[in-house]
Image (tube, rainbow, N blue to C red):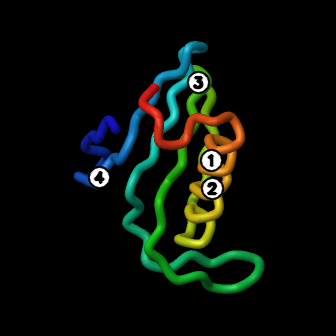
């Protein structure tokens, strides 16, 4: 993984540049509580950021449950294509 220091000294866990020059980052969030249309959700949280260009980015503020679901989905995909546990 490519750890980095994010804004305000928060931990960046990965910064990945794709073949299409998109940048995907996973970064620690300082939030301890998030308020949604479904009510309050307690942290911790992590940011998932996808920048497709300098001017355009998309962000998701993930709860622990959200992050686990994404992790499990990526692991399932790696298993399906026979790549889980293999280096590159």
Residue under circle 2?
Answer: 70
- The mark closer to the camera, 4 or 1, is 1
Task: Report helix, strand or loop for mark 4.
Answer: strand
Task: Report helix, strand or loop for mark 2.
Answer: helix
Spatial CA distance of label 4 from label 1 is 22 Å
Spatial CA distance of label 4 from label 3 is 23 Å
Residue under circle 1?
Answer: 74
Residue under circle 4?
Answer: 11
Residue under circle 3?
Answer: 55
Q: Residue at x 37, y 66 (%)?
A: 30
Spatial CA distance of label 4 from label 2 is 19 Å
Spatial CA distance of label 3 from label 2 is 26 Å
Q: Say whether residue 15 is left or right of residue 7.
A: right
Viewer-nearest residue: 5 or 66: 66
N-terminal of the pair, mark 3 or mark 2, is 3
Q: Disc 4 vs disc 2: Cβ atoms closer than 8 Å?
A: no
Q: Position of residue 83 (x, y in %)?
A: 57, 35
């Amino acid at each position: 993984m490519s750890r980095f220091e994010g804004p305000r000294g928060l931990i960046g866990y990965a910064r990945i540049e794709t073949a299409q020059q998109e940048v995907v980052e996973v970064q620690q969030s300082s939030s301890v509580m998030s308020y949604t249309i479904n009510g309050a959700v307690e942290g911790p949280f992590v940011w998932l950021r996808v920048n497709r260009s300098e001017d355009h980015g998309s962000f998701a503020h993930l709860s622990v449950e959200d992050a686990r679901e994404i992790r499990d989905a990526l692991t399932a995909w790696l298993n399906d294509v026979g790549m889980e546990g293999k280096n590159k």
